[in-house]
Amino acid sequence: QVQLVESGGGLVQPGGSLRLSCAASGNSYSLNAMGWYRQAPGKERELVAAITSGGSTGYADSVKGRFTIGRDTAKNTVFLQMNSLKFEDTAVYYCNGRRKDALNRNIDYWGQGTQVTVSS
């Protein structure tokens, strides 16, 4: 099992910045990738950014150039640096960890979510 705990959400004005962190514990060494998803009211959960165990990263088009995902391997932590925040970035942000099982199926773990609100 893997446990994921997010921190760092809050209220910020448009154009501002926030940094989210996700601390992984348990069998976190088994994860192939970690990422951040978000879900706004009335919308489906969407992938924001991801980083593989090899360090490769990927971003949703809507956040490219504004968000940066990174990790601190020694601390088993993944962060999401969010700059130039927009109203439409308002959502609950979830940390995700993914591994493969013996049948090569994806097994996902989720944090409890942290609210990010962009408002003037």
Image (tube, helix red, strand yellow):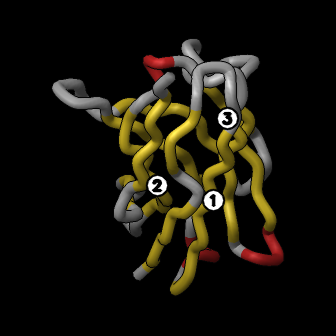
Q: Earlier in the sequence, mark 3 or mark 2?
A: 3
Front position in the image: 120 or 85: 120
Label 2 secondary element = strand
- Residue identifier under label 2: 96
Residue shown at 38% from the left, 56% from the top: 113
Q: Position of residue 35 (x, y in %)?
A: 55, 47
Label 3 secondary element = strand
Residue projecting furthest to the top: 61
- Residue identifier under label 1: 21
Is disc 1 surrounded by few (<14), some (14 to 19) or many (20+) residues within 10 Å?
A: many
| Residue type, numbered disc 2 | Asn
Is disc 3 surrounded by few (<14), some (14 to 19) or many (20+) residues within 10 Å?
A: many
| Separation (CA) of disc 2 from disc 1 | 12 Å
Does 3 sit above or below residue 46? below
Does 38 sit above or below residue 3? above
The image quadrant of residue 31 is bottom right
Does 87 sit above or below residue 57? above
Label 1 secondary element = strand
| Residue type, numbered disc 3 | Met
Residues under numbered marks 3 and 2 in contact, where contact means CB atoms less than 8 Å apart: no
Q: Give the number of the disc on residue 90.
A: none
Residue projecting furthest to the front: 120
Is disc 2 surrounded by few (<14), some (14 to 19) or many (20+) residues within 10 Å?
A: many
Residue shown at 74% from the left, 35% from the top: 68
